[in-house]
Image: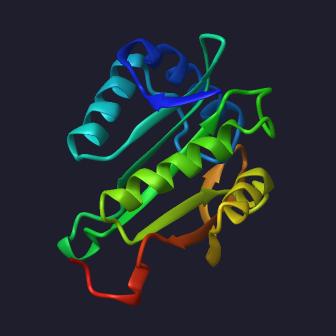
Amino acid sequence: MLIRDARDSDLPAITAIYAHWVTHGRASFELDPPDLAEMTRRRATVQAGGYPYLVAEHAGQVLGYAYASLYRARPAYRFTVENSVYVRPGEARQGAGRALLDELVTRCTASGFRLMIAVIGDSANTASIRLHGAAGFQHAGLLPGTGWKHGQWVDTVLMTRELGAGRGTPPG
């Protein structure tokens, strides 16, 4: 498996992966899957901000994708990133999610970020919660009933992982 920067040619596969989870899952609180043009715009925004946008590839196929992005717009949050990881249906527990998340952590640490936040849709999303826990994230909170999707209220789980020196020292 190869973890690499996402390319323009990956965007149809990325769009299809995300569309599946928007349509069939509760990890994303979007109700309608964005089209290729919108996913292209979103990737460009992430990359323009200097954040990594990665894919896991095996045998020429995109198995999943991940990116880091701005957590909040106010300047005091500038050392904090939020992560997103999505794996193609049928590829769960094959290592793509973990490899993507590990590389995201590595790159964000090298860029000087101090905290990564996982905002996980659905407290029943045990796959994502386990993935983040295995990668060193700690449970930071539960926001009950923050979204309404597929006919039910859905919680948001917050998990965090310190990067580099974390909060142990002032940023450089």
| Residue at 74 percent of width and 27 percent of height | 89
Residue 143 visible? The answer is no
On the image, the x and y values in percent for residue 167 come to 40, 85
Q: Quadrant of the N terminus?
A: top right
| Residue at 61 percent of width and 58 percent of height | 120
118 vs 110, left or right, is: right
133 vs 90, left or right, is: left
On the image, the x and y values in percent for residue 82 come to 44, 58
| Residue at 27 percent of width and 32 percent of height | 44
Q: How is the image coloured?
A: rainbow
On the image, the x and y values in percent for residue 88 come to 68, 27
Q: Quadrant of the C terminus?
A: bottom left
Which corner quadrant of the image does residue 147 belong to? bottom right
- Judge by depth and name the residue closer to the eye, 155 or 45: 45
52 is higher (above) or lower (below) than 38: below
Which corner quadrant of the image does residue 142 belong to? bottom right
On the image, the x and y values in percent for residue 62 come to 59, 20
- Judge by depth and name the residue closer to the eye, 97 or 37: 97
Residue 97 visible? The answer is yes
Q: How many marks?
A: 0
| Residue at 54 percent of width and 71 percent of height | 161
